[in-house]
Amino acid sequence: MVNAEVWQSLTEELTAKGVTLVAVSKTKPASDIQDLYNLGQRDFGENYVQELVEKQPILPSDIRWHYIGHLQSNKIKYIAPYVYLIHAVDSFKLLEEINKQAAKHNRTIKVLLQLHIADEETKHGLDERGITELMEYYEAQKDTLQNVEICGLMGMATFTDDVVQVRVEFARLNNCFKHLKATYFIGKSHFDTCSMGMSGDYHAAIEEGSTMVRIGSMLFGARNYPA
């Protein structure tokens, strides 16, 4: 069930700060997404390709779908016709495949590179060196990658109550974002997204420079995982 009051106050807070709200709707029924859409929400995030494939055709066509989970190359073709932003690109191979599938539909897909900032091996992403290497590949071959657009970075902090650690991790992501903007993307207005922060840590993320937060449980309640 959607919490309309929380959405309203959250939207007002984030809009005032110039931060985009992505409502994370994974495991939630299409009816809940429709309810939040009716309130005015347009950006929705999904973690699983199968869920997105099932929901997209039965919901309004102007929803901006964000794919925020770890994405396998062989699954890109299923979401390429409509996905608005892919959040977790962690290899040049994945970037190439997104470009390939986007070209088939004569469209450009926006992406974020994922930086691994957490003190947890289970989270995906590149380190700073890996992102630099990916950007070197990209610079050398970008003429052949006309159907993909790198718009920024994303990362997930460690799941911990240590606010200082979380802030350090967010600051690391923002520093990498600012470095890329001042080097590879100097003068490029489309490189404008530093996506970090979820329901439990979005305040710290915004204070450390986030321009996009991913909020699920605050809006939709606990997730509906099968028994």
Image (spheres, rainbow, N blue to C red):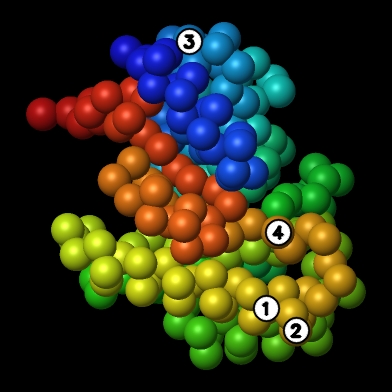
Q: Quadrant of the image for the N terminus?
A: top left
Cα separation, mark 4 vs mark 2, equals: 14 Å
Q: 10 Å neighbourhood of mark 2: few (<14), some, or many (≥20)?
A: few
Question: Distance from label 2 to label 3 (Cα)?
Answer: 42 Å
Q: Nearer the viewer, mark 4 or mark 3?
A: 4
Residue under label 3: 35
Residue 49 at least partly seen? no
Instruction: Identify which amino acid the numbered label 2 is placed on.
Output: Thr
Of the numbered discs in the image, which one, if any, rests on residue 180?
1
Q: Earlier in the sequence, mark 1 or mark 3?
A: 3
Three-letter residue code for mark 1: Leu
Across the whole image, how many numbered discs are drawn on residues? 4
The kind of secondary structure element at disc 1 is helix
Q: CA distance from mark 2 to mark 1?
A: 5 Å
CB-based contact (under 8 Å), mark 2 and mark 1: yes
The amino acid beneath tag 3 is Asp
Q: Earlier in the sequence, mark 4 or mark 3?
A: 3
Residue 183 disc label: 2
Which mark sits nearer the N-terminus, 4 or 2? 2
Q: Position of residue 77 (x, y in %)?
A: 62, 47
What amino acid is at disc 4? Answer: Asp
Q: Is residue 13 visible?
A: yes
Picture residue at 64% right of the left edge, 57% below the top: 193
Q: Mark 3: few, some, or many residues within 10 Å (few <14, many ≥20)? A: some
Q: Disc 4 designates what residue? A: 192
Q: Marks 1/4: CA distance? A: 11 Å
Q: Is residue 181 above or below residue 79?
A: below
**Mark seen at residue 165:** none
Q: Sequence-wise, which precedes: disc 1 or disc 4?
A: 1
